[in-house]
Amino acid sequence: MRKFNPAEIVLMRKAGEMTGNALKYVETLIKPGISTLELDKSVKKFIIDSGGTPSFLGYEGFPGSICASPNDVVVHGIPSADVILKEGDIISIDLGVLYKGYNGDAARTFPVGEISPEKQRLIDVTRESFFEGIKNLKVGHRLGEMSHAIQAYVEKNGYSVVRELVGHGIGKDMHEPPNVPNYGKVTDGPMIIENTCLAIEPMVNMGRKEIWLIEDGWGIITRDGLPSAHYENTVLITKDGVEILTL
Ligand code: MG
């Protein structure tokens, strides 16, 4: 965990704002019949036109500017002309913006047209688990207090938390220490210090927590085939509290 100086915080806020704006933009495009490759192309243009760089593109060889993960795909879905959104699907979009050397990273799960109440509840609980988590994110407290709160909220609602993938520190690199798990004990993890940034990202499965890596080497799916949702924001922690940078 690294302290940011005031000039860096200004740039983190800007990168975060651009990331949040790109997610609001992609939400306007989601409808039955559109492919995830079309979403990717449009978001890439939007981010570049806004003065940023799509940080996922080329990251460890990733071919898209967004991760587009429908239904039972947990995260890291590669955008494809063959993946066409259908009425009743859910689609998780994760994206990052690099601005003047600083990173924003955020994700949302969106409904495609009308979805079942069960899928809507999964989306809602996943988002709520993030907010339950950050209530417990405080300077001088263990990171595990937040991780534990996310897990407790998700499991109380009958869902499960993915273990293999976690949130992360963020700043000049998209992924910096520490790991930010969405599960664990209140005594786990480092002590929170002020003026640090984290990407907090619960990944919540409707059924069991187990996952598979698919053959493209990127996509992660649920083993039981049930849907999964994702909600992520980049946050700044100061002595005054938690500021969400990517809303
Ligand atoms: Mg992330």
Image (tube, rainbow, N blue to C red):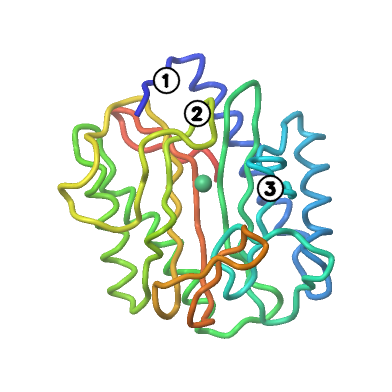
Front residue of this view, candidates 81 and 196:
81
Amino acid type, residue under disc 1 in the picture: Phe
- In percent of width and height, residue 26 lies at 73, 55
Callout 1 crowding tier (Cα within 10 Å): few <14, some 14–19, many ≥20: some
Circles 2 and 1: CB atoms closer than 8 Å: yes
- In percent of width and height, residue 208 lies at 39, 78
- In percent of width and height, residue 50 lies at 77, 33
Circles 3 and 2: CB atoms closer than 8 Å: no
- Tell me the distance, in whole angstroms, between the alpha carbons under discs 3 and 2: 20 Å
**145 lies above or below 120:** above
* Mark sitting earlier along the chain (3/2): 3
The kind of secondary structure element at disc 2 is loop
The residue where tag 3 is placed is 62
Camera-nearest label, 3 or 2: 3
In which quadrant of the rendered image does the C terminus lie? top right
Q: Is the CB of the residue bearing disc 2 within 8 angstroms of ligand 1? A: no
Amino acid type, residue under disc 2 in the picture: Gly
The residue where tag 2 is placed is 171
Circles 1 and 3: CB atoms closer than 8 Å: no
Q: Residue at x 50, y 51 (%)?
A: 232
Q: Is the CB of the residue bearing disc 1 within 8 angstroms of ligand 1? A: no
Amino acid type, residue under disc 3 in the picture: Phe
Front residue of this view, candidates 247 and 3:
3
In which quadrant of the rendered image does the N terminus lie? top left
Callout 3 crowding tier (Cα within 10 Å): few <14, some 14–19, many ≥20: some
The residue where tag 1 is placed is 4
* Mark sitting earlier along the chain (1/3): 1
